[in-house]
Image (spheres, rainbow, N blue to C red):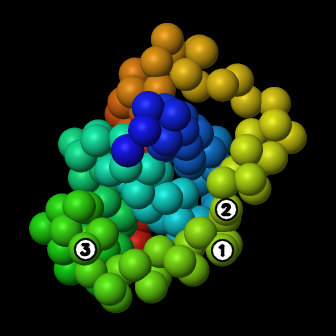
Amino acid sequence: MSDHTTERSQRLAALYLQLANQLPHSAPRDTLHRLLLLAARHACDAGWHVEANLCQECVRRDNPRHLVSRFPTMPAALLSADYLDFERQLKRQCPQERAEHLAEVQRLDDPAVSFDSPLRAARHFLERLSLDEPVDGD
């Protein structure tokens, strides 16, 4: 993977996590799950397996019956044809361009700039998400 692709994956992982943190508590949980799983994909692409697995764990904690819960790790999920089919749907529902547009409309600062690095931003947003109590249902 090229440095440009890795940098873009890092930035997108942090961006999806930032958007997940901006969701109101009244937002549908499946919206949160979509953002977390898209962040997890980009985290894996960036080589951030710990952060990707934390995204997966947030979804699993919230909904143990979710497809991603079948896999021990996020990289393992990305090897599954079933999961990849599901991920294609996620990417159609919230493509990168839409995520970038949402951040612009909400006037969110670039997380990589605000936190000195995308990884530091991702860890900050994951820590905030992990402090939230799970909510039943999807």
Q: Can residue 4 be seen in this view?
A: yes
Q: Which of marks 1 and 3 is nearer the N terminus?
A: 3
In this figure, which residue is indicated by the disc labeled 2?
A: 95
Q: Which of marks 3 and 2 is nearer the N terminus?
A: 3
Instruction: Give SS at disc 2.
Output: loop
Amino acid beneath label 2 = Pro
Which is nearer the eye, 127 or 107?
Answer: 107
Residue 92 is labelled as 1
**Residues under numbered marks 1 and 2 in contact, where contact means CB atoms less than 8 Å apart:** yes
Real-space CA distance between mark 1 and mark 3, rounded to the nearest whole angstrom: 20 Å
Residue at 75% across, 56% down: 98
Residue 52 position (above or below residue 37): above
Q: In this view, does 77 lie to the left or right of 132?
A: left
Amino acid beneath label 3 = Leu
Residue at 22% across, 42% down: 50
Q: Is residue 15 left or right of residue 98?
A: left
- Tell me the quarter of the image containing the N terminus: top left
Which is nearer the eye, 7 or 111?
Answer: 7
Real-space CA distance between mark 1 and mark 2, rounded to the nearest whole angstrom: 6 Å
Residue 123 is labelled as none
Instruction: Give SS at disc 1.
Output: helix
Q: Residue furthest top?
A: 116
Residue 27 x/y as whole percent: 65, 61
